[in-house]
Amino acid sequence: MSDRRKPVSEVDDPQRSGAKQPERFDAHRADKLDDPSRFEYLPPDAILSLLDLPTGAFLVDFGAGTGAFAIRLAQARPDVSVVALDEQPAMLDRLRAKPQAHTLANLRAVLPDELPCLAGRADRVLALNVLHELGDAALASLAGLVAPNGFALFIDWNAEADRPVGPPRDHVYSPREAVERLERLGFTAQSLPSLPYHYVLRAKPRSATRD
């Protein structure tokens, strides 16, 4: 079989092996991430409630993109330290250029090379619209961030939902497929009430020691 027939994630970017979507999100389309209409079907208040952040928590927004949600969460909870992590420097440059980001002492943008410093520290990890893009190696990195008694919140496009926005259905998971993938890669996953176009899963690495 020629390389032409293999998914892009396995040919051009081995780190994305295992991802459902063949190509990572193109930074040239970053304007879509700052479209305020996203907050209509992904309400920040609902996400904040689902995160159930303890006082003084440490939150990692994994795959934060241009920081639209990281900024809203940091504004709503000034007691919480928010780390916006993304693999694409261009995305984080857009985040840092936003006037709101300059006023938030509790928000920091970082690249994956800082992952070792964050290991085991996150009370919560938010993975918003990224499970279908994450390779197995990235999911392992995400699991390594979660602190004992913490959890990761996966909110992602639902392949079973009728929706006018988002990736094609064959590029994303159904809730059952998402649970199966997470459990295959070492998480326990619990389904939470869904959002209009998204499923919601609370997941914990099985290897972590918890009360």
Image (spheres, helix red, strand yellow):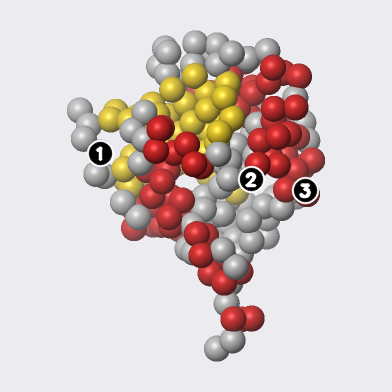
Q: Is residue 137 visible?
A: yes
The residue at the point 69 percent across, 27 percent down is 96
Q: CA distance from mark 2 to mark 3?
A: 13 Å
In what element is the residue under mark 1? loop
Query: Is residue 66 toward the left or the right of residue 37 in the image?
Result: left
Q: Nearer the viewer, residue 137 or 209?
A: 137
1 and 2 marks in contact (CB < 8 Å): no
Give the amino acid at mark 2. Answer: Gln
Q: Position of residue 71 (x, y in %)?
A: 64, 23
The residue at the point 59 percent across, 61 percent down is 21
Give the amino acid at mark 3. Answer: Arg
Q: Nearer the viewer, residue 51 or 79?
A: 79
Mark 3 neighbour class, 10 Å CA radius: few under 14, some 14 to 19, many 20 or more? few
Mark 2 neighbour class, 10 Å CA radius: few under 14, some 14 to 19, many 20 or more? some
**The quarter of the displayed image where residue 109 is located:** top right
Residue receiving disc 3: 29
The residue at the point 59 percent across, 13 percent down is 105
Indicate which disc, 3 or 1, sits on the residue closer to the N terminus.
Answer: 3
Residue receiving disc 1: 208
Q: Position of residue 65 (x, y in %)?
A: 65, 39
Quadrant of the snapshot with the N terminus: bottom right
Residue receiving disc 2: 88
Q: Position of residue 128 (x, y in %)?
A: 56, 40
